[in-house]
Image (spheres, rainbow, N blue to C red):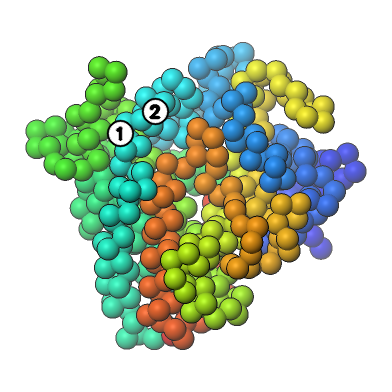
Amino acid sequence: MHAYMISRDSHASAEPRDRAFYQNPYPFYSELHATAPVFFWENYGHWCFAGFKEVNALLRDKRFGRQILHLATREQLGLPEPKPHVAAFDQTEKYSLLNLEPPAHTRLRTLVNRAFVSRQVEQLRPRIERLANELIDGFEADGQVELIKAYAAPIPAIVIAEMIGLPAEMAMQLVNWSNRMVTMYMFGVTHQTELDANQASAEFMDYLNGVIAERRSQPKDDLLTHMITTEVDGQRLDDEEIMSTAILLLNAGHEATVHTTGNAVKSILESGIEPTRLFAGDQQTAATVEECLRYDAPLHMFTRYALADVELEGGVRFKFGETIGLMLGAANRDPLRFTNSNSFDPFRSDGGNVSFGAGIHFCIGAPLARIELQVALKVLFQRLPALRLAAAPQYRDAYHFHGLERLDVRF
């Protein structure tokens, strides 16, 4: 019995919280590609796009945006009023780069972009390599480990914490807050989940408030000080903007990389390909990482609002304020774009993916994430050549954020 259904009129239903579905959404995507790459997802109540060409184009289409309340009121759009019990969470999102549209987006992104350009993050490679080796030193003698908690999570969490200017020993607390906050993006969020995410948001802001105050009196050579002191067009960021940006960078700076690391190790081990071939030289290592990002993406859906009445090629129409879903995980498996799209092939000549998005919201941390993945995977397989799965890996119950709950391995 399938965990999904696609009808003739391009309507589909697939329950995002159904275990069979979130453990493996790829059969659903294959059927969509064959029958309805543009479809109305009943469970979400909006139209979605699964084709690579369409997703790539819509990510860049300025008629769609991440924000709508700068153009209309909640009342006009028929949106519910904000919930008082998630006020702290909403506060962290208020100036999030992910949600802003120009000109506010341009101003904030210009400010932090400098820290994330390739030549800047390339300097972090030795630090990441040292960290990867230290973590393996800590569990190598055990002969087995749960890899997400022991390796995949600490690397990006420590690196982004240090970049922003927070102590490395705070990294796993930041991961805890982040994990609790992203549950807000899950399908069918419960009241209890909302309360917990809000509590995590309040604790996170409280901690950062203290650090921001400290940096104002004692500046350091870190990204937080840069955000506090730099002017853009004669204006400085206020504390709320600094807070939202720091939280976004900390959360986004590890969340997807943790998932990609775990998913990549699973893909490599299940493929049976000899790891020495996958990491033979920088070029092949980079190609392996790109294929891991394509084959089992860390983020499966990104939504956009129609910022005007829009008619797309093929006559699909959207009214101002309507939501559309861009299916990154499905686009990466589009057979029209990739030969043997459901096969893991790090030697393919038609590589590429939309895992980092595209357009003005293209992931600011992509150069950093790529370096972290290249180093973490290469070091792991070099140090532990006998690495193998100790149990069937299980994905978390969070369809959007497609990552493993745990990854038990032996070596």
Whether residue 4 is visible to the viewer of this picture, yes or no, is no
Amino acid type of the residue tagged 1 in the rendering = Met
Residue 223 visible? The answer is: yes
Residue receiving disc 1: 243
Query: 40 left or right of 81?
Result: right
Confirm or deny contact between disc 2 and disc 1 (CB under 8 A).
yes
- Please tell me how many numbered marks the rendered image carries: 2
Task: Please report the residue visible at 69 percent of the width from the left and 46 percent of the height from the top.
Answer: 52
Name the foreground residue: 389 vs 378: 378
Disc number at residue 109?
Answer: none
* Residue neighbourhood size for the residue with mark 2, other residues' Cα within 10 Å, grouped as few (<14), some (14–19), many (≥20): many
As rendered, which of 224 and 383 lies closer to the eye? 383
Q: Position of residue 369 (x, y in %)?
A: 42, 54
Residue at the spot 83% in from the left edge and 52% down from the top edge: 34
Return the residue found at the far left.
218
Callout 1 secondary element: helix
The N terminus lies in which quarter of the figure? bottom right
Question: Which kind of residue does numbered mark 2 sit on?
Answer: Tyr
Q: In the rendered view, would you say 410 is above or below 103?
A: below
Residue drawn at (48%, 79%), measured in percent from left and top? 276
Measured from the top left, where is residue 125 in percent x and y?
31, 60
In this rendering, position of residue 120 left or right of residue 261? left
- The picture quadrant where one finds residue 109 is top left
Residue placed under numbered mark 2 in the picture: 95
Residue 171 higher or lower than 304, as above or below: below
